[in-house]
Amino acid sequence: MFEHGMTLAEVGYFSSRMNQGTKTTAELCLLMALWYLALLTTSHALCPSHQRSYTPADGKEICCDSCAEGEEMRERCTSANPKPTCAPCPEGFYNPPRTIYKCKVCNPCDKGSIEVKPCDKSSDAVCKCPTGSESKNNMETACLCKKGNHIVANQCVPCPQGHFSSDDNSKCRPWTNCSATGEEQKEPGSSTKDVECARTKTSPSQVFRSLPSTMAPVPGNTTTSHPRATERKFVVNNATPDNNSSANWKFLSLILIAVILLMVSATVFLIMSIHMCQRKEKKKFNGCKIPIQEETEPCLTKQITV
């Protein structure tokens, strides 16, 4: 069988028609076209399984070698050289054997999908969705295990009692224990949300402390009273401070800071005043003149002595 559905029997039939002298112009044209197609068919290269038919720029069809698995073709073969230039696929890529195409990127098994076979140099990864989950594509590289469920032993199953998962493809977590943090439960939990806790205004627990006390004897009573311990109850109020008390503390803190600043300013002013007074007293002392002593003339001294 030749290409385009032409067989040797059909060619022989039209040849016999021509030999019988019943040929027409249309039959002659058809016969010539069939012979041309048969010639083209026989001229096609019959390549072995490890090669592919390729027609380079010169128009002559040749058999070209293929690249091995995990390789890609960088340069095609030519009429002079039937071997192409091949190179290994980079990390994270693959290519099947006997191909002339570029390497293909590996498709990882996304969150929620189970990897059955990892990607290697000749084939892509094989992924599978857990039982009970939904597949997002035909390759099952992405799966959906809805919130309120989690994956256990390759199965998407509901969260156990007292646990929840608020996101798709997430693990179940236990509910928050409100009493462990001194709070009370405000809203109950479910398989998709946690419980809501709220702080109490006063703590329900009370601390009792016992202090011993001695009973003194009553005057005039002959009986001696023995000491006995009485219990005194002290209630510790663990009330949570409200917003008003915190605002009062802030106001008192500001007043305290202002008083401290005033005291520091007054102290500095007092020290400077004392220092200025001392400087003025020193200047007054240095400004006083020493009295000048008059000298007596020698002649007057002589007259007095005579």
Image (cartoon, rainbow, N blue to C red):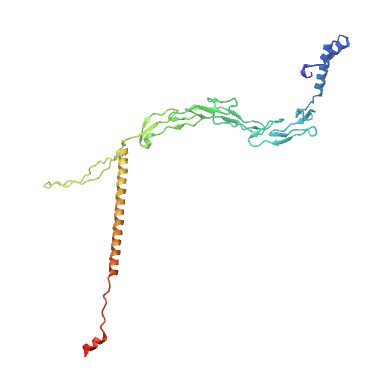
- Along the viewing direction, whichever of 132 and 244 lies nearer the viewer: 244
**Most extreme residue toward the left, as rendered?**
220
Residue at 30 percent of width and 51 percent of height? 262
Q: Is residue 298 above or below residue 121?
A: below
Q: Is residue 99 above or below residue 258?
A: above
Q: Is residue 55 above or below residue 14?
A: below
- Residue 245 at what x, y percent from top left? 30, 40
Note whether residue 255 is visible.
yes
Residue at 30 percent of width and 61 percent of height? 276
Q: Quadrant of the N terminus?
A: top right
Residue at 37 percent of width and 37 percent of height? 181
Residue at 32 percent of width and 43 percent of height? 250
- Residue 99 at what x, y percent from top left? 71, 30
> Horizontally, is 242 left or right of 28 in the view?
left
Q: Is residue 290 above or below residue 195?
A: below
Note whether residue 239 is visible.
no
Q: Quadrant of the C terminus?
A: bottom left
- Along the viewing direction, whichever of 67 and 74 lies nearer the viewer: 74
Q: Give the tally of numbered discs.
A: 0
Asked which quadrant contains residue 304, the reply is bottom left
- Along the viewing direction, whichever of 32 and 265 lies nearer the viewer: 265
- Residue 7 at what x, y percent from top left? 80, 16
> Horizontally, is 287 left or right of 31 in the view?
left
- Residue 26 at what x, y percent from top left? 82, 12
> Horizontally, is 45 left or right of 288 in the view?
right
Asked which quadrant contains residue 8, the reply is top right
- Along the viewing direction, whichever of 211 and 5 lies nearer the viewer: 5
